[in-house]
Amino acid sequence: MICKNTTIKGLKIIQIDCHEDNRGCFYEFYNKKYDSLINGTRFAQINFSKSKKNVFRGMHLLKDEQQYKLIKCINGKVLDIVIDCRKGSSTYKKCFKIELSASCNYELLIPPGCAHGFLSYENDSIICFMVNVSSCGKQEIGFNIFDSSIFRNFSTENSLILSKKDSLLPAYDVVEGMF
């Protein structure tokens, strides 16, 4: 694996080795050597999310929890978005966007204190993600994708499809004190 830094402190793009032949391909989604990237903790839960085209999921994070996420698109294509919500961070409020697809060999390692969301570009886009801390209702917080103070120039040709929960999320400045 090759680990690359991004414009957000602690956010890493991991380029994985993909071995292809006439049968298809093989790659390691996770190996215990990843534990060194997440301060020696271990992943506790694996989640899958399947989305239709134009579905937006996010922006979510856990309040007061040290949750790392390891993200891989295993079908389709998405625009993955990360916002640094750590007030003491040198990259506070920075936004990072990257296209992830089943055909690219990238994973995204998201550090604690960063909000995450993604926009599905294709029907049946599937995201697999591992977390070291299981999500719990009381700790889950988020903010609205349409908050112009964070998402400057964020647009899509078609209307976004959001869950009722995500469409009712407050603006960033309302939840900013919870981080």
Image (cartoon, rainbow, N blue to C red):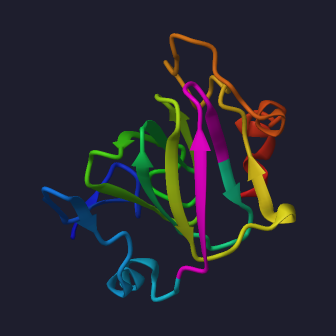
- In the image, farthest residue toward the front: 23
Can residue 30 be seen here? yes
**Considering depth in this image, is 106 or 85 the residue closer to the camera?**
106
- Give how far across and how far down residue 120 sits, in percent: 52, 33
Classify 103 as above or below 18: above
Q: Which residue: 45% across, 78% down?
A: 38
Quarter occupied by the C terminus: bottom right
Image quadrant in which the N terminus is located: bottom left
Q: Is residue 166 above or below residue 102?
A: above
In the picture, measured across the screen, residue 14 lies left or right of residue 146, that is left
Q: Is residue 47 magenta?
A: yes
Counting labels gives 0
Please tell me in which quadrant of the rendered image residue 134 appears: bottom right
Q: Which residues are magenta?
A: 43-59
Is 93 above or below relative to 15? above
Q: What main secondary structure does the magenta stretch of the protein show?
A: strand
The residue closer to the viewer here, 173 or 147, is 147
Report x, y in % for residue 141: 77, 52
Report the residue at 64% width, 40% height from top.
57
Name which residue lies at 32% across and 85% down. Answer: 33
User: In terms of image quadrants, where is residue 43?
Assistant: bottom right
